[in-house]
Image (cartoon, rainbow, N blue to C red):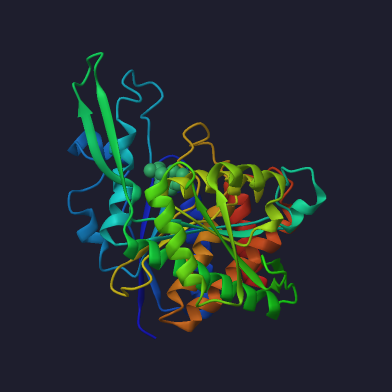
Amino acid sequence: ANLTRIAITPGDGIGPEVIGEAVRCLEALRSKHNLALEWTRFPWPSHAWHEQHGQCMPEDALEQLKDYDAILLGALGDPGPLDDPDRYLLPDSISLAPLLDMRKGFDQWVCERPARLLPGARQYLADARAKDIDMLVIRENSEGEYVSQGGRLRKGTPDEVATQMEIFTRRATDRIIRYGFEQARQRAELRDREGRARTFPTLDGKQLASQVCLITKRNALRHWGDMYTEAFEAIARDYPDVATHHELVDAACMKFVQSPWAFDVVVASNLQGDILTDLAAVLSGGMGVAPSCNLNPDDPHMPSMFEPTHGSAPDIAGQGVADPTAMLFTTARMLEWLGRNDPALADAGKELYDAVAADLAEHGGNHRDTSEVGESVCRRLGNG
Ligand code: IPM
Ligand code: MN
């Protein structure tokens, strides 16, 4: 197989700590299976880089990253050293910009955030049915509320006006909704193979093997809501085997807590998906276990980016206590994705996923240091 090359950007806070465990597992898998895989580190800690260069990443960061097959990212966002009186002076918008630049620059228009409550993960909801939570939230990752257009008029005066535009195109809407239906089908097939088929009701009384739920706020935001709904209904006709469902985002928040086990695939806009996925992460055991990825499914020459849902967690950074489980699940997903070019990587991804899940099932309830989790997963890989 051709050599697969990964760019590793550990980033800030707990980023380098959890990345360390991901690299440990990658090394174990590479030597065990003789994988044609290599990686390069780009240590661009935003605060230090900003101090030296006035920016959180090199000017040509995207240029440096573009020829890699994937980017594995720890976390970005750094309020600065604890003893620095200017702590927090570095505006979040600057330190997070590289993340949004990468998503945009590499056209990673899909953000996949699975929320499955696995054995061993903390169950926050008291209802016993919560153990069946298994949903995939698909966040539109290229436009919507994140187009960053608008501005501030009469800044600083009592008459100030801030405008923040949202832009939704039919093209980006169609592709994300179609992606959702394709995922629903694949999930149904997988569940079938693994003997855990589910059913979802349709309005006309049928039971189907998967479901896509579209999130809007079309009772208030009409133009966008109507276009999303029309696109959804048109595309749904190509997927008679998939049940459809529609929730307003506020009601969806309520139902995520009330009956999250009733959801399968959920398609949401950029900001609403961002908000819903923090909630979904908690439903599936918390930020410590929630993986995420930013995919460009069309262009094999553009790297997709793999980062956990969690951030740099400055409050626990430097203590070696961050849970690397989310990062390890994210790394497994990266290998699976790269398996499109090299099936050995897909197998390694599955092996890593199974090892992390088994580790979680056995030790999930215990307090363990970052490296203990990584070591324990690696031991499993060794025995595998
Ligand atoms: C996320 C984060 C980012 C987002 C921030 C850091 C810009 O919250 O990946 O969910 O809003 O997309
Ligand atoms: Mn977020």
State left or right for residue 62 relative to residue 196. Answer: left
Residue 359 percent across, percent down from the top left: 69, 59
Residue 37 percent across, percent down from the top left: 40, 74
Q: Residue furthest right?
A: 128
Q: Nearer the viewer, residue 349 or 174?
A: 174
Could you say which quadrant of the image residue 243 lies in?
Answer: bottom right
- Is residue 108 visible in the rendered structure shown here? no
Q: Residue at x 53, y 56 (%)?
A: 291
| Marker count (numbered) | 0
Q: Residue furthest front?
A: 204
Q: Residue furthest top?
A: 158
State left or right for residue 76 relative to residue 252. Answer: left
Quarter of the picture holding the C terminus: bottom right
Q: Is residue 164 above or below residue 3?
A: above
Q: Residue furthest bottom?
A: 1
| The image quadrant in which ligand 1 is located | top left
Residue 179 percent across, percent down from the top left: 46, 69
Quarter of the picture holding the N terminus: bottom left
- Is residue 339 visible in the rendered structure shown here? yes
Q: Nearer the viewer, residue 206 or 101?
A: 206
State left or right for residue 176 relative to residue 361. Answer: left
Residue 205 percent across, percent down from the top left: 72, 69
Q: Residue at x 18, y 54 (%)?
A: 60
Q: Nearer the viewer, residue 228 or 306?
A: 228
Q: Is residue 158 above or below residue 292?
A: above
Could you say which quadrant of the image residue 162 lies in?
Answer: top left
Q: Is residue 351 above or below residue 134?
A: below
Q: Nearer the viewer, residue 252 or 223?
A: 223
